[in-house]
Amino acid sequence: MAYEKFNILKSTAVPLPIENIDTDQIIPARFLKATERLGFGDNLFRDWRYSSDNNLNENFVLNNCIYDGKILIAGKNFGSGSSREHAAWAIYDYGFRCVISSFFADIFKNNCLNIGVLPLKVTQEDLDYILELVFENPSLEITVDLMNQKLIIPDKEFQRFFEINSFKKNNLMNGLDDIDYLKNMKDEIINFSNKIPF
């Protein structure tokens, strides 16, 4: 399933400085019945956004109107736990296109890259600094330049290079998941297979 192309993202950010957020906290297991990628954003961080009687938890950052944007800044070790793809789907469906953290669980990281969300790893020192800036100024704009692999905060003359797999980078920039990539190579695959003697 194709998704929104990712090239240069300029956005404010939502700070969530909690460490060891696992996939069950991102999207609780009781919401995993659907097989399509749509609708999961409604239940992103469900048990933190709502109380047990389904009232909004006004103390949770996603319910705080001063924070908004397509960038989520999370604590260390984001996306640990089960391998459910739905966690990445919920992040994307809610509207986030980039998650910044100092460490990501590998499976969650790959699920994000396959759905159009950039998991951007920074040092713990840089993460703490960025969180501090966003708390001080919720309207602070952050730029993520995927082509040049740079994280930039223009107001603070802050710039950092980040690593990303070249294959995943290409797919993100073209809005392709792994299946889309193969579909785009259909003619080449057929031509190659026709040259193989049986």
Image: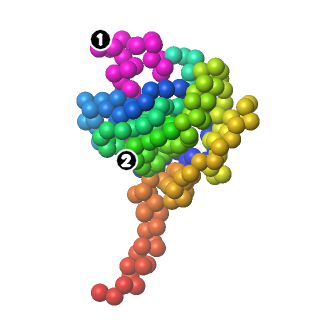
Pick the residue in front: 179 or 109: 109
Membership of 58 in magenta stretch: yes
| Residue 81 at x, y percent in the picture | 32, 38
Q: Answer whether residue 93 is visible to the viewer in this image.
A: no
Label 2 element class: helix
Question: Which quadrant of the structure image shows residue 48?
Answer: top left
| Residue nearest the observer in this picture, 135 or 56 | 135
Q: Does the magenta-highlighted stretch encompass residue 41? A: yes
Dot 1, crowdedness within 10 Å: few (<14), some or many (≥20)? Answer: few
Location of residue 122 (image quadrant): top right
Location of the C terminus (image quadrant): bottom left
Earlier residue among tags 2 and 1: 1
Amino acid of disc 1: Asp
Q: CB under 8 Å between callouts 2 and 1? A: no
Q: Secondary structure at mark 1?
A: loop
Q: Which numbered tag is attached to residue 107?
A: 2
In-image side of 149 versus 121 (left or right): right
Q: In this view of the protein, which residue sits in the foreground, 126 or 186? A: 126
Q: Position of residue 11 (x, y in %)?
A: 62, 32
Q: Residue at x 40, y 85 (%)?
A: 195
Is residue 156 rendered to the left or right of residue 183? right
Residue at (36% x, 38% y) in the render: 80
Q: Residue at x 51, y 56 (%)?
A: 165
Crowding at label 2, few (<14), some or many (≥20) Cα neighbours within 10 Å? some
Of the two numbered discs 2 and 1 in the rendering, the one whose residue sits closer to the viewer: 2
Height in image: 81 above or below 129? below
Q: Give the residue type at disc 2.
A: Ile
Residue to which mark 1 is pinned? 53
Start-end of magenta stretch:
37-63
